[in-house]
Image (tube, rainbow, N blue to C red):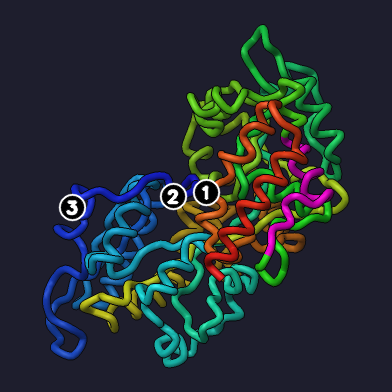
Amino acid sequence: MNRKLLLASASVAVAALLAACSGGGGSGSADSGKPVTITYGIWAGTQTPAMQEIADAFHKENPNITVKLETRPYPEFWSTLQTGAAGGTAPDAFWMLAQQIRPYAAGGQLLDISDAVKAANVDLKNYPQAVLDLYDQGDGKLYGLPKDVDTNAVWFNKALFDKAGVPYPSANWTWADFRATAKKLTNPAAGTWGVAAPLDYQSGYYNSIFQAGGKVISDDGKSALIDSPEAQAGIKFWTDLQADKSSPTLQQLSDTEAETMFEQGKVAMYVSGAYWALKLYQNEAIRAKVDVAPLPTGVKKATVTSGIENVGYAGTKHPEETKKFLLFASGQEAANIQAKTGAVLPAYQGTEKTWMKAMPEFKNLQIFIDAKAYSVPLPVQGNAAEWQGLQAKYLTPAWDGKVSVAEATAQYADAIDKVLAENG
């Protein structure tokens, strides 16, 4: 699973496809006792088999309710959801990201599950409070429950370290250590780089902004702080890697994604989340070469945290069945399914060790769990998807060395402030 911004607008063809296969298919209801089919929208990836297992386990407990998975590539997922939610044909249940939720909640397109959570005596303490808070829209409604939790760390290729004679990262390494290590691992003759430094907020520069003691948005959500000296230092951490030529350029990373370059052995280090573990583990060509280290420390330790929530569509024809499934899909049994398959680090408390045991050759996955202690919620104030979507326009010149970080962030901050003002 690659957490990216909304990349495409919806098309008529996509809307027609969605209308044909979603929007609460089947007949009957909880009152009638007749069989009901509800749809569950997810983006395609390594988690799909686990989601099918969860759907099957739910059906086994509720024989009158069938859950049909609808999987789409990540960009198409969001464009299709946008069209479906506006047009009355969205899936009954679907994945949601914190940076995307506000327009759907404000538009009355999400199902309030507060009553179901209360009736089932769901203990919200079983979920990370930081993730719950990310989805809180301040309207007193509960639209979903977390299914997983993210923190970030440094994935590294031991074979490339060994070949270059570079020691593996230590638990307490610093920004300076990281930069020096990346330089030593870069070998132009061999076509390998020490690190991938893409323009990536969640796995990249937000982490270093917080490590520098900065913030992206003010606590009251009314103004950007990405142009503060601390935030600029956090961004410069990444532009320095580009300036050192320790990373492929943004153009090269556009031609071949950082994840792919890492798996191909062309990049020695890559910062990413726990959700990437299974994909690497399933790659037998690289599995034995991969290890993980904590993020380097700046002024302090920090990593952003987030997670997917299972939410429902307000226009579903089967609200009670959908609510029942949503509680199950984010509950303990579903979390254990996610954990034992290695699909993702579940949000449900107490399932972490099961997740680690699913990938025994990765000895240091505990790092992602330990990172919860110094995690910072992903900045999602206002219409986050909109202002985060402007990052490429304003920050690419800094990554490419064409403008200073100070100039780029000043312009980006102005653009963010306009979005925040427009969306309250």
Q: Which mark is residue 17?
A: 3
| Above or below: residue 88 compared with residue 231 | below
Q: Which mark is residue 6?
A: 2
Q: Amino acid at mark 1?
A: Gly
Front residue of this view, candidates 387 and 166: 387
Q: In which quadrant will I find the C terminus?
A: bottom right
- Does 374 sit left or right of 82 as displayed? right
In the rendered image, which residue does mark 1 sit on?
389
Quick one: label 3 or label 2, which is nearer the N terminus? 2
Q: Amino acid at mark 3?
A: Leu
Q: Between label 1 and label 3, give the one nearer the viewer.
A: 1
Q: Magenta stretch? A: 223-238
Asked whether residue 228 is drawn in magenta, I would say: yes
Determine the residue positioned at 34% across, 74% down: 325
Front residue of this view, candidates 128 and 328: 128
Quick one: label 1 or label 3, which is nearer the N terminus? 3
User: Residue 35 location in percent, x, y?
Assistant: 14, 77
Mark 2 secondary-structure assignment:
loop
